[in-house]
Amino acid sequence: MSPPDSDTARLPAQTVARWFADEVKPHERSLRAYLRSVFPGFPDVDDLVQESYVRLIRARENGRVSYAKAFLFTTARNAALDFFRRRRVVRIDSVEDISKVGALEESPNAAEAVNRQQELALLAAAVRQLPVRCRQVMTLRMLYGLSHKEIAAQLRISDQTVKAQLAKGMRRCAEYLSARGVS
């Protein structure tokens, strides 16, 4: 008899392999499509998928996975965001005025930090609600910091389309946030 999912003991390889084949592998195609749509400029989706699998299997071994698909998609999104956070390191010698970096600001208290996290979660939800092309343009501009020209070249659309999609995305995100009490 195979151990239950909540068992924290090391699971036999066959049990993990069967669980992976039944519960995880069927979602690989939709995971890749999701990652390409939400993070169109991500350098290597294959690495991200593999990293997500590793994190998922480790979490399952610790008994923290109750619904594999949801955990897999959340883990993949978090792994991509981790990549972008690491990439946004500011070189000290490139900063003329250290106060521009924001390192000297007071750190927020717990309530402000929770509030900011909730607002970021709402913003992420607002972006997920956007049409695919609009979401791609917004992601490339806001997350990757690409110029209008770079976005147009990458997505093979005109500069005017980029501008229109950005305006549409900003307006819809503002409406989404406003409807939920965030100014």
Image (spheres, rainbow, N blue to C red):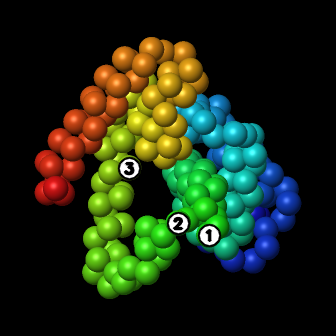
Q: What's the residue type where badge 3 is placed?
A: Ala
Residue 141 image position (x, y, % from top left)? 45, 38
Of the pair 58 and 81, the residue shown nearer to us:
81
Q: Residues within 10 Å of mark 3 (few under 14, many from 20)?
A: few
The image quadrant of residue 10 is bottom right
Q: What's the residue type where badge 2 is placed?
A: Glu
Q: In this view, does 54 lie above or below 166?
A: below
Identify the mark nearer the N-term, 2 or 3: 2
Residue 113 image position (x, y, % from top left)? 35, 76
Figure quadrant of the C terminus: bottom left
The residue at 28%/81% (across/down) is 111
- Report how far apart the C-alphas of labels 3 and 1 lie in the structure: 30 Å
Q: What's the residue type where badge 1 is placed?
A: Ile
Figure quadrant of the N terminus: bottom right
Q: Which residue lies furthest to the right in this view?
A: 13
Are the residues flagged by discs 1 and 2 in contact, CB closer than 8 Å? no
Residue under label 2, please give it: 96
Of the pair 163 and 13, the residue shown nearer to us:
163
Looking at the rendered structure, the secondary structure element under dot 3 is helix
Residue 72 makes an appearance in the image: no
Identify the mark nearer the N-term, 3 or 1: 1
- For marks 1 and 2, give the one nearer the viewer: 2
Q: Which residue lies furthest to the front in this view?
A: 96
Residue under label 1, please give it: 92
